[in-house]
Amino acid sequence: MGSRMIDKKTADKFVWCAVIGAFLAGLATLALIIIGQLSKSSANYGFNLWNLLDVALFWGLAFGIFKRSRTCAIILFVYSLLNRIDMWQRTHDIGIAIGGLALVFVVLYFLGILGTFAHHSIKKENQAEASGKSSS
């Protein structure tokens, strides 16, 4: 095996970054839904039961990334970016705290992309080595 920029251990860490990030994003969304539904205020910050689909999407994609799905990693990254763009278009302002936190999650999701692709690359190399050894 040649020199790799990302080894298996690092790839697994990158995957876990995205899995944990997506899980926490879903958990935070669920908490805000519950708070919004339980509040006596008429303003629940735009959260409603349809946001449960958002939670399911985050957790479903987290599971897919845990299973090393490159497709899920890309979808999560793009979905997160599109959500930030939509938020900015609606409010024309993203606070430093929320914008900075969103940037952290985008980086975690990008690491997930790197990790899943590296995982499959390593797996393919290992299979090629194994088939090369068995044929000799």
Image (cartoon, rainbow, N blue to C red):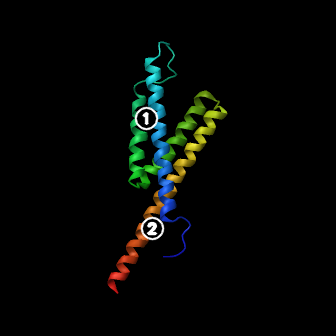
- The three-letter amino acid code for the residue at tag 1 is Asp
Depth-wise, is mark 2 or mark 1 nearer the camera? 2
- Disc 1 marks which residue? 54
Q: How many C-alpha atoms fall within 10 Å of the one at disc 1: few (<14), some, or many (≥20)?
A: some
Query: Which numbered circle lies on residue 68?
Result: none
| Image spot of residue 55 (x, y percent) | 42, 35
| Image spot of residue 58 (x, y percent) | 43, 40
| Image spot of residue 23 (x, y percent) | 45, 41
Q: Residue furthest left?
A: 134
- Disc 2 marks which residue? 122
Identify which residue is drawn at 57% across, 32% down. 87
Q: Is residue 93 left or right of residue 12?
A: right
Q: How many C-alpha atoms fall within 10 Å of the one at disc 2: few (<14), some, or many (≥20)?
A: some
Identify which residue is drawn at 39% across, 75% down. 128
| Quadrant location of the C terminus in the rendered image | bottom left
In-front residue for pair 88/51: 51
Looking at the image, residue 82 lies above or below residue 38:
below
In-front residue for pair 116/11: 11
Looking at the image, residue 64 lies above or below residue 3:
above
Mark 2: which secondary structure?
Answer: helix
| Image spot of residue 91 (x, y percent) | 61, 27
Identify which residue is drawn at 42% across, 49% down. 72
Mark 1: which secondary structure?
Answer: helix
Looking at the image, residue 114 lies above or below residue 108:
below
Identify which residue is drawn at 48% across, 76% down. 1
Looking at the image, residue 43 lies above or below residue 69:
above
- The three-letter amino acid code for the residue at tag 2 is Ile
Q: Residue furthest right?
A: 96
Q: CA distance from mark 2 to mark 1?
A: 32 Å
Q: Are marks 2 and 1 in contact (CB under 8 Å)?
A: no
Q: Indicate which disc, 2 or 1, sits on the residue closer to the N terminus.
A: 1
